[in-house]
Image: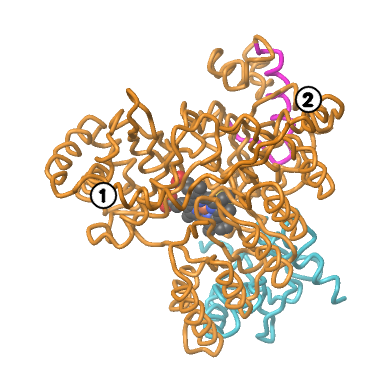
Chain colours: A cyan, B orange
Amino acid sequence: MPRPFTPKVVTANRLLEGDAVWRTRDGDWSPDMAQAELIEDARTAELRLLEAAAEAHLVVGAYLADAARGETRPEPVHFREAFRTRGPSNYAHGKQTDMQEKT
Amino acid sequence: MYRFNDFDEAFLRDRVSRFRAQVERRIDGSLTEDEFKPLRLMNGLYLQLHAYMLRVAIPYGTLNSAQMRQLAHIAERWDKGYGHFTTRQNIQFNWPRLRDVPDMLDALADVGMHAIQTSGNTIRNVTADHFAGAAADEIADPRPVAELLRQWSTDHPQFQFLPRKFKIAVSGSRHDRAVTRAHDIGLEIVEKDGEIGYRVIVGGGLGRTPMIGKVLRDFLPQDDLLPYTEAVVSVWNLLGRRDNKYKSRIKITVHEHGIAEIARLVEEEFQQIRPGFAGLDRDFLSHIEHFFAAPALSEKSTAPNDAAYETDPVFRAWADTNLAAHRHPDHAIVTVSLKKHGGTPGDATAGQMRVLADLAERYGHDELRISHEQNVILPHVHKADLPAVHAALKAADLATANVGLVSDIIACPGMDYCSLATARSIPIAQQIATRFENLKVEHDVGLLKIKISGCINACGHHHVGHIGILGLDRAGVENYQVTLGGDHTETATIGERAGPGFSADEIIPAIERLVLGYLDLRESRDETFLQAYRRLGPAPFKALLYPEAKADAA
Ligand code: HEM
Ligand code: SF4
């Protein structure tokens, strides 16, 4: 029996800013994981990663990260990925403030 | 003042302009990331979890006020207004943007600094005691010898393709503050019958397979330093394993062949090559020594210090913990703590850097040092000036009186910044410091070294902490493993694992039980945590960490 597929998102760091970004359904890169496309099967995951690899002028080190289907949006599974959506815990730097400034 | 630089101005400018072009070519797509990555790493630029990070070298941890001011300027102009001083005696900027990095490097070159990382399997930069040239217990300043070794090994044709990187540390004092026993070669300047020589220690290192270096030669005459060091490196170059990068460091070679066999082979090689060396180049060494000459210390009354010590309890508490004995009795070595309770170990704001620069210029012969314990040092301050220095530090929120105490914690960046991390380290350090500050016991507890790493690479030196904490990922949850009894000094020891790890919630209470429990175990106020551990062995300390296990066994 095939093992159940853990849903994935494609994520990377932006080339110019270095911040964490996620690949959206439209093939853009968003600093907000809520915008990410949640990928539910292995073949699509592979394909999306290849597409991301072709965008080396925008992002660095794209990879597939496990994600969960939240109420309305993909959510991180591992704590490392959760930290990437927020920023460091010792200062209010990174997304936890940058994102608020935008909204 | 000596420019402790590997590179001259023209070379630095050339490197920056080449890197500027490389950045442009990466951005316009003519360089792939695979091509660009080694180039940016060579220039000190890493990509971390949330941003790029620029790592700037501070050779021998030594800075002048102009350089410190420039670091402040860089922090403000291109980063978020602060910098992080590390156990490797360098500074890291956590938020640069790729396009700005060439400008940052140019700003560094303006003050003779750079972010060039010696990389590859070569002899890396040589490190030395941060109290060099000032400590009362010093036999000789270790920096000239460190600099001699660095210049000798740079571009040495035989040593460009070593099995792995190779690090040397030099201590010039009876007390080892350079962690010589955790380096591939550690040299201790020693004195025998009025003659200066070196104790040679090999095979130390931390990381995945921690080892304490072993004494290879108890007394090596000064003139034999270069041929003997060359013999050590040559023997390892032949024997060192190239098949497995985890087994290639000299610590594994020494472990596999035994120190006696290595000593025999080194001696053989040494006898062969020695005639080819005309003796340690004394002219060259004294030329280097000239650049490290001691500052002209002033003579004046220490009365202001004595008065403040009598009347100001805050000053007294600070003086008792943060000062070290200077070789001149009217002077002191000031350690400025970057470990304010609840703060991030090793961080300084741009404003604080400027205050430190001003103090160095006004009261400290323009010298600043960065210690591997992530503090800043004013190595030569006249005692008469201490009250003024303390007042200025207090105004800049830099007068925390905790050097060597529970809250003077070494912590690596961990998963708040580092992409290799398996758990966070900074919040653990913050919480321990805050907890003990609230308990008001740290002066009673006395000397205690807590060191925290966020993964097995051990950048936070946890193996040699009296209490070491290693952050791991256990099934997707942060977990903290405790080691006990480590020591980074001349009596270096690798700490022993105490038992199962603790969750992020459990680790702070566990450390509290351990430290408060020690207060009941010690024989007297004078017995430090480490001494009590050595006297009693691990059992009573484990019982403090794991009270339920004890209850189960009963
Ligand atoms: C955040 C970026 C960092 C990365 C990617 C990194 C990576 C590493 C790696 C891979 C090693 C093991 C090298 C080896 O043994 O071959 C190492 C060792 C080391 N790192 Fe870091 N590190 C980082 C930050 C730091 C910081 C901030 C410090 C100081 C606070 C530090 C201090 C050290 C030290 C002292 C060692 C040597 C341990 C030994 O003796 O084996 N590193 N680092
Ligand atoms: S010990 Fe690990 S987590 Fe900490 S800085 Fe080094 S590589 Fe990063």
Asked if the residue at label 1 sits under 8 Å from ligand 1, the reply is no
> Residue at 50% across / 29% down in the picture?
B175
Q: Nearer the viewer, residue B443 or B457?
A: B443
Residue B257 % position (x, y):
23, 36
Task: Identify the residue position indicated by label 2 in the image.
Answer: B441
Q: Residues within 10 Å of mark 1 (few under 14, many from 20)?
A: some
**In the image, is residue B517 part of the stretch drawn in magenta?**
yes
**In the image, is residue B390 part of the stretch drawn in magenta?**
no
Q: Is residue A10 above or below residue B472?
A: below
The image quadrant where one finds the C terminus of chain B is: top right
Q: Is residue B532 above or below residue B491?
A: above
**What residue range appears in magenta?**
B500-522
- Chain of the residue under label 1: B
Residue B531 % position (x, y):
57, 18
**Residue B241 - label:** 1
Query: In which image quadrant can residue B130 be found?
Result: top right
Q: Residues within 10 Å of mark 2 (few under 14, many from 20)?
A: some
So how many labels did they put on this image? 2
* Whether residue A60 is visible: yes
Question: The residue tagged with tag 2: helix, strand or loop?
Answer: loop
Residue B151 % position (x, y):
35, 57
Side of B378 where B113 appears, left or right: left
